[in-house]
Image (cartoon, helix red, strand yellow):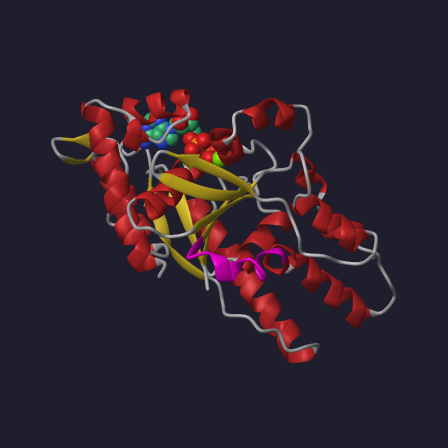
């Protein structure tokens, strides 16, 4: 049964997509894990575009081919028959195979406000629960076929993020090592606790839910800056603060050109040559080993 790990953060541009992409590839290429990537980011669809460049233009014009998570929420809103099937696209290179549920910009319209409302409190709470369970409902029949499901997301607290959090067994939070990050991480941990507490309440009062609390496995330092072989002093201070805010991965990734070149070429940094790329590749390999132990 797959371990489901969500990459979430309150802030944009902190390296969620870069981290989830490289860890997903390393899990398959270097650890022979079967990996499904779910792109829940309706703002950029960054990881879908990284795997399938043909999707970038479609995404920008508001389209997404095939059956996506969006259609599954629509089924709830129209109170019609529900089916968990979505389209899965496969990405392969010389030594890696990754399955992907690609992004749909229309997920930005997902909201519990669109659920059919009744004057029955019990019924309303159950449909709120079904909304939160939507991604889990889609993943349940698929989980037996994978070791890891990696979910990339948008930087915003939303009803989609609540579904992502419900579906996840573990969450990690990529961060830049600045003061804003530790504040953002506290918000994210608060959201995870909200989802866990809501399920507990419903489980006690309305219907028993088969659910394990989602764990926060730690922040991941991205775009870190070093000085003399260690983190710069201000970044070390933030890193120490993050240790007290839900924990932080020992391994981090430094800021540098290797990842920029990899992004421009739409390949993983493992395929780029050069001193900086080698360093960042090594960092992602160490990070992936730690990921395997923190998100078993
Ligand atoms: N360590 C790094 N060194 C240099 N550039 C990096 C590094 N990590 C990420 N980047 C670049 O920073 C930009 C933002 O990263 P990324 O898209 O992974 O962030 P994100 O959190 O997914 O953003 P969003 O919230 O918009 O989805 C990208 O252009 C990426 O290539
Ligand atoms: Mg992203």
Residue 173 in percent (x, y) is at: 41, 47
Q: Nearer the viewer, residue 261 or 32?
A: 32
Q: Nearer the viewer, residue 146 or 264?
A: 146
Q: Nearer the viewer, residue 191 or 109?
A: 109
Residue 159 in percent (x, y) is at: 65, 50
Residue 187 in percent (x, y) is at: 49, 50
Q: Is residue 148 above or below residue 56?
A: below
* Residue that protrudes farthest toward the front in the picture: 94
Q: Does residue 204 belong to the magenta stretch?
A: no
Q: Residue at x 59, y 59 (%)?
A: 136
Q: Is residue 248 above or below residue 211?
A: above
On screen, residue 291 versus residue 117, left or right, reads left
Residue 5 visible in the snapshot: yes
Quarter of the rendering containing residue 167:
bottom right
On screen, residue 176 versus residue 55, left or right, reads left
Quadrant into which the C terminus falls: bottom left
Task: Report the span colored magenta.
Answer: 138-148
Q: Residue at x 63, y 44 (%)?
A: 87
* Residue that protrudes farthest toward the right in the picture: 119
Q: Residue at x 45, y 60 (%)?
A: 2
Q: Residue at x 20, y 32 (%)?
A: 279
Q: Nearer the viewer, residue 226 or 83?
A: 83
Residue 148 in percent (x, y) is at: 43, 54
């Amino acid at each position: 049964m797959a371990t489901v790990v969500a990459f979430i953060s309150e802030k944009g541009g902190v390296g969620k997509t870069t981290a989830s992409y490289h860890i997903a590839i390393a899990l398959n290429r270097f650890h022979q894990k079967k990996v499904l990537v779910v792109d829940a980011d309706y703002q950029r669809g960054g990881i879908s575009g990284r795997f399938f460049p043909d999707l970038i233009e479609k995404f920008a014009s508001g389209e997404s081919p095939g059956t996506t998570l969006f259609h599954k929420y629509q089924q709830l809103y129209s109170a019609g028959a529900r089916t968990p099937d979505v389209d899965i696209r496969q990405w392969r290179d010389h030594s890696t195979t990754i399955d992907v549920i690609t992004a749909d910009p229309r997920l930005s319209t997902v909201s519990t406000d669109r659920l059919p409302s009744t004057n029955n409190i019990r019924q309303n709470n159950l449909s709120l629960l079904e909304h939160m369970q939507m991604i889990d409902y889609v993943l349940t029949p698929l989980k037996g076929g994978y070791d890891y499901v990696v979910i990339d997301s948008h930087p915003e607290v939303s009803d989609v993020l609540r579904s992502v959090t419900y579906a996840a067994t573990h969450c990690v939070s990529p961060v830049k090592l600045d003061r804003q990050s530790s504040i953002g991480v506290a918000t994210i941990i608060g959201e995870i606790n909200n989802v866990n507490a809501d399920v507990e309440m419903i489980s006690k009062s309305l219907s028993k839910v088969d659910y394990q609390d989602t764990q926060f496995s730690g922040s991941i330092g991205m775009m870190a800056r070093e000085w003399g072989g260690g983190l710069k002093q201000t970044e070390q201070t933030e890193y120490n603060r993050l240790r007290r805010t839900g924990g932080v991965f020992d391994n981090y990734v430094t800021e540098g050109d290797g990842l920029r070149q990899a992004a421009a070429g739409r390949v993983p940094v493992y395929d780029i040559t050069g001193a900086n790329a080698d360093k960042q590749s090594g960092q992602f390999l160490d990070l992936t080993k730690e990921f395997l132990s923190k998100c078993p």
